[in-house]
Amino acid sequence: MNANLQIKSFEEYKEKYAKSIEDPAGFWGEIAEEFVWQKKWDTVVEWNFDEPKIEWFKGAKLNITENALDRHLEKRGNKIALIWEPNDPKENVIRFTYQELHNRVCQFANGLKAKGIQKGDRVCIYMPMIPELMIAVLACARIGAIHSVIFAGFSATAVADRVNDAQAKMIITADGLNRGAKQIPLKRVIDEALELCTSVETVIVHDCLGWMPTMVEDRDCWWHDVVKDQSIVCPAEPMDAEDMLFILYTSGSTGKPKGVVHTCGGYMVYTAYTFQNVYQYEASDIYWCTADIGWITGHSYIVYGPLLSGATTVMFEGIPTYPDPGRFWQIIDKHSVTQFLTAPTAIRSLMAFGEDHVLSYSLDSLKVLGTVGEPINEEAWKWYYLHVGKERCPITDNWWQTETGGIMISGIGNLSPMKPTYAGYPMPGIHPVLLDQEGKEIQEANVEGYLCIKAPWPSMLRTTYGDHERCRINYFSHYKGYYFTGDGAKRDEDGMYRIIGRIDDVINVSGHRFGTAEIENAINTNSHVIESAVVGYPHPVKGQSIYAFVVMDGAVEDEAMSKGEIVETVVAEIGKIALPEKIQFVTGLPKTRSGKIMRRILRKVAEGDTSNLGDTSTLLDPLVVDEIVANAL
Ligand code: WT7
């Protein structure tokens, strides 16, 4: 933790913010001085949003693990870096000091090298939430291999898509994982995925459950064999500030998930800076983020941000409701957690079990709360504030995206004013604007617009892996000169932002992001499906849920059976996390004369609001709407 990075009052925030917008290079150059660079930069930032080309700290050399690990050893080598809490509260907690984590990362990094992994190679990681996942990520970064973590809930097909797109040379996995009372196989999924992949030469398997999966000769090896006899000394590979650090796949409004690319220097500076400010982290604090490292929140705010700040970060293997819905609160008391970050969907699911589970814990240690991943409704905000924060702790509502790398709009610890359902203020260096339909900047307060960002920030995405044009079209072509977020928002008279939600064809289910096209493609792989249209609709716990309208190749005789088959198709193509909650069989979809599906109408039907469907007379077949409305679920 570096005292020089931390803002200490709201006044200071305003000063820093003004400076950061006037003189971004001066502002970020000063912050970057607080890190270890093997060579300093020639320029702080060079950019244009047309190609786009964004370069931060050009010419500099660094290794992010030197900053996240080695830098702390002298003063904080014996400080706990990681507290790992197992799925089953009766199992042992694992604690690693900075020195121990450093040693394990170096040892595994040497193992990766021994398996032929070199700088620039892509390594996919498909693992449980165990310490080895963090070690694997950092070991890749140590030697300059590009990690691409795949959330361990994705199916074999989804894994294969990502592995193939990244042309990964290695996969790191485990036999299986613990999830509440269930155990879920992972290695088996990888074996199936690899039937569809040719780039992978090695699979490293961590023995997590003692399952003894079949090991393919010359391809599969055990983690414990890989690290055996490896030295705990491994030099940190010098990386250019703009070398790739990782790829993380995320869904967009079109096509297959895309590989968002983050680079070393800017990502390091920004995640550390935002972590220390939003959470007002102090040296003896214990910080816990409940996200999975398979998502960007886990990358930036379980692994990199906290470790770069010399923090103690908690990592939890399990789920909020196992063995009972008090599990989160029990863990907070057990480890005296001071900062706690979770998702609105988790809060809402726990609210449903009643207050008793939270009221039986003291939660005295808490200082700052966080929420992330989707808009938080007022009821959940108040419950969180009252029962978890005991009206003592500020709630920081962190708005950002996989593409932004770090928190963009949020409260700042207890320094900034709060307003339920408002994310808050832009972080220093972030220049949000709201655009109207014509792309004009909205100046008035309380008017909704498209949320865009006007200037670069250090941790923004640089490209989409293997397809730069897709990056340009997705994020930089909607409004010239702006990064387009896909979210709608408004700003009040005090300059606080409220995020309304996605305005594109992206659905956010329990904080997991899916494109409607992605789910439709999955459904359409079922041989009996002619076509389908998927929309999101509000769900009390998940935020949004998935409603699929499906046209089959003949009359549906057994609805339950056909639905079951479609569900299986989606599970096989993407994973259980993308299951449509409602499936309605229809004889046709509402289309314009040019063949475009009228999602607006389907969304209204899914929301149960069919009172005003607008003008449907121009549709190709207006009668299908009547049928859809009559049979709506
Ligand atoms: C989308 C990004 C940020 C890491 C986790 C999700 C929505 C995210 C908030 C928030 C309202 C939010 C947006 C955004 N979102 N945080 N605090 N308030 N909406 O990352 O999977 O890349 O999804 O999640 O719609 O665009 P992601």
Image: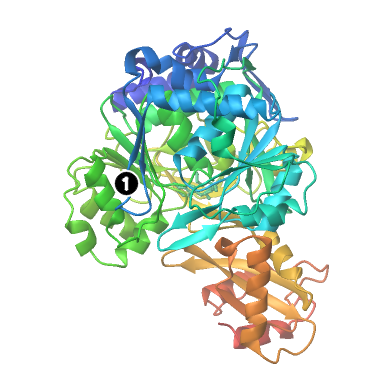
Q: State whether residue 24 appears in this view.
A: yes
Which quadrant of the rendered structure holds the C terminus?
bottom right
Task: Give the side of residue 453 with respect to residue 181, left or right.
Answer: right
Task: Give the side of residue 9 with respect to residue 434, left or right.
Answer: left
Residue 463, picture quadrant: top right
Compared to residue 364, the image places residue 214 above or below, namely: below
Residue 15: x and y in percent read: 37, 20
Secondary element type, mark 1: loop
Residue 470, picture quadrant: top right
Front in this rendered view, residue 199 or 537: 199
Task: Give the side of residue 588 with respect to residue 433, left or right.
Answer: right
Which quadrant of the rendered structure holds the N terminus?
top left
| Visual colour scheme | rainbow
Compared to residue 74, the image places residue 171 above or below, namely: below
Residue 181: x and y in percent read: 40, 63
Amino acid identity at mark 1 = Lys
Front in this rendered view, residue 490 or 485: 485
Task: Give the side of residue 507 with respect to residue 397, left or right.
Answer: right
Residue 117, picture quadrant: top right
Compared to residue 476, the image places residue 189 above or below, namely: below
Q: Disc 1, ligand 1: is the CB inside 8 Å?
A: no
Q: Residue at x 76, y 45 (%)?
A: 164
- Location of mark 1 (residue): 419
Compared to residue 153, the image places residue 308 above or below, namely: above
Q: Residue furthest right?
A: 594
Q: Residue at x 44, y 58 (%)?
A: 179
Q: State whether residue 478 appears in this view.
A: no
Residue 99: x and y in percent read: 39, 21
Give the total of numbered labels. Answer: 1
